[in-house]
Image: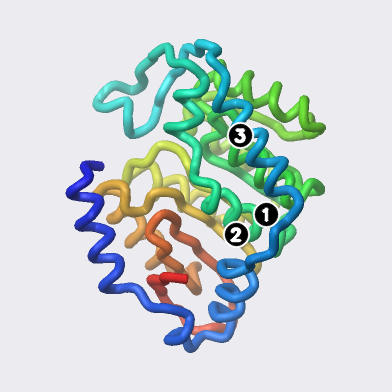
C-alpha cells in the first residue's frame, strides 16, 4: 500500500470510527474495557517481545516461498532474505501482538487455527496466552516453518502443529481435524477471493463463542471488499473494525451490529 493511499484509508477510518463512549452494545463495551483497553503489564509480554527481538537480530539467510498477495500474478515466488529482514517486515507491532495475546487470554479458546506462521512470532503470542489450546498453524514456506518449529521447541511449545503448504490445498484436511473452531487468526494470502473462501470454510465450524481476527483489512481494495462481504454473513453477530485488524463474533441473542472503533 502506498503511503498516500494509506493516509487516505486511515483518514476515512477516522471519520467513520467511534469511541467507547458512543457504543451502546453492552457486549462490545465490555470487550473494549476488558480486552482492547486492558492496560495490565502481563509478565509474558517481555518474554514474547524478547523472543521476537532475538529472531529480528539474526542474519541467517532463508530461502522463502510466498503464495500470498506479494507473489503477484504468479502462483508463488521465491527469494532469499536475512531472517532479521523477514521478522521486521512481516511481524506485527508490539501493541498489536499484545492485543492478540489479550484476546486469546480473555477467551481461553480450546481450538485455535492460524493462517500464516512465518517464523512463529504471532503464533508464540497466541500459544503463550492459552497454552492448553489445540493449536494448528499453516505456513506456505517450509524453511520458515522449520525456523518457527525450532522457535516453538526452544520455548517449550513442541505441541504446536505446523502444516506446510498452499492454504488452498491443505485447509480442508486441517478442518477435518476440528469439531469446532474457537479462535482463528487470518494472517496470510491477503487477497479478496481466497480470504472470503477461507472464511466460508472456517465459519462452518464456528460456535457462539468463536472469535475470528483478520489482519490488514484495509491493505487493499480487495481486502476491504473481502471484509465487507465477510462481516455481512448471517452467522456473524458483531464485527469490529480496528483498521489494522477486523474482529468477528458469532454470539447468539444479540442484535447484529458493525462497529468501527478507536479505542
For residue 52, which numbered disc appears in the image? 3
Q: Nearer the viewer, mark 3 or mark 2?
A: 3
In this picture, residue 90 sits left or right of residue 252: left
Circle 2 crowding by C-alpha within 10 Å: few under 14, some 14–19, many from 20: many
Q: Is residue 162 above or below residue 142?
A: below
| Circle 1 SS class | loop
N-terminal-most mark, 1 or 3:
3
Q: Which residue in the structure is indicated by mark 1?
A: 180
x%, y% of residue 187?
A: 48, 42
x%, y% of residue 159?
A: 79, 33
- Where does the N terminus fall, quadrant-wise? top left
State yes or no: discs 3 and 2 in contact (Cβ < 8 Å).
no
* Residue 118: quadrant of the picture: top right
Q: Residue at x 44, y 49 (%)?
A: 215
In this picture, residue 22 sits left or right of residue 139: left
Q: Is residue 213 above or below residue 125?
A: below
- Quote the CA–CA distance across marks 1 and 3: 30 Å
* Residue 250: quadrant of the picture: bottom right
x%, y% of residue 137?
A: 62, 36
Q: Is residue 176 above or below residue 29?
A: above
State yes or no: discs 2 and 1 in contact (Cβ < 8 Å).
yes
| Circle 3 SS class | helix
In this picture, residue 156 sits left or right of residue 236: right
Q: Is residue 121 above or below residue 104?
A: above
Q: Which residue in the structure is indicated by mark 2?
A: 206
Q: Residue at x 67, y 54 (%)?
A: 180
* Residue 224: quadrant of the picture: bottom left
| Circle 2 SS class | loop
N-terminal-most mark, 3 or 2:
3
Q: Residue at x 41, y 24 (%)?
A: 66
Amino acid at each position: 500500500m502506498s503511503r498516500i493511499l494509506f493516509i487516505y484509508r486511515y483518514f476515512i477510518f477516522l471519520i467513520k470510527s467511534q469511541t467507547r463512549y458512543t457504543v451502546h452494545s453492552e457486549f462490545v463495551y465490555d470487550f473494549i474495557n476488558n480486552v482492547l483497553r486492558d492496560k495490565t503489564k502481563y509478565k509474558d509480554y517481555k518474554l514474547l517481545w524478547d523472543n521476537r527481538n532475538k529472531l529480528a537480530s539474526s542474519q541467517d539467510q532463508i530461502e522463502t516461498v510466498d503464495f500470498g498477495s506479494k507473489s503477484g500474478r504468479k502462483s508463488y515466488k521465491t527469494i532469499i532474505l536475512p531472517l532479521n529482514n523477514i521478522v521486521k517486515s512481516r511481524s506485527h507491532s508490539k501493541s498489536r501482538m499484545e492485543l492478540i495475546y489479550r484476546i486469546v487470554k480473555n477467551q481461553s479458546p480450546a481450538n485455535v487455527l492460524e493462517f500464516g506462521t512465518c517464523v512463529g512470532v504471532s503464533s508464540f503470542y497466541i500459544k503463550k496466552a492459552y497454552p492448553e489450546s489445540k493449536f494448528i498453524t499453516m505456513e506456505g514456506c517450509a524453511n520458515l516453518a522449520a525456523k518457527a518449529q525450532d522457535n516453538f521447541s526452544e520455548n517449550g511449545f513442541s505441541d504446536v502443529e505446523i502444516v506446510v503448504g498452499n492454504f488452498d490445498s491443505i485447509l480442508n484436511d486441517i478442518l477435518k481435524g476440528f469439531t469446532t473452531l474457537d479462535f482463528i487468526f487470518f494472517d496470510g494470502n491477503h487477497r479478496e477471493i481466497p480470504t472470503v473462501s477461507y472464511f466460508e470454510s472456517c465459519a462452518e465450524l464456528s460456535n457462539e463463542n468463536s472469535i475470528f481476527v483478520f489482519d490488514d483489512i484495509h491493505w487493499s481494495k480487495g481486502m476491504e471488499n473481502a471484509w465487507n462481504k465477510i462481516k455481512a454473513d448471517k452467522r456473524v453477530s458483531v464485527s469490529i473494525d480496528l483498521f489494522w485488524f477486523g474482529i468477528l463474533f458469532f454470539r447468539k441473542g444479540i442484535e447484529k451490529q458493525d462497529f468501527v472503533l478507536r479505542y
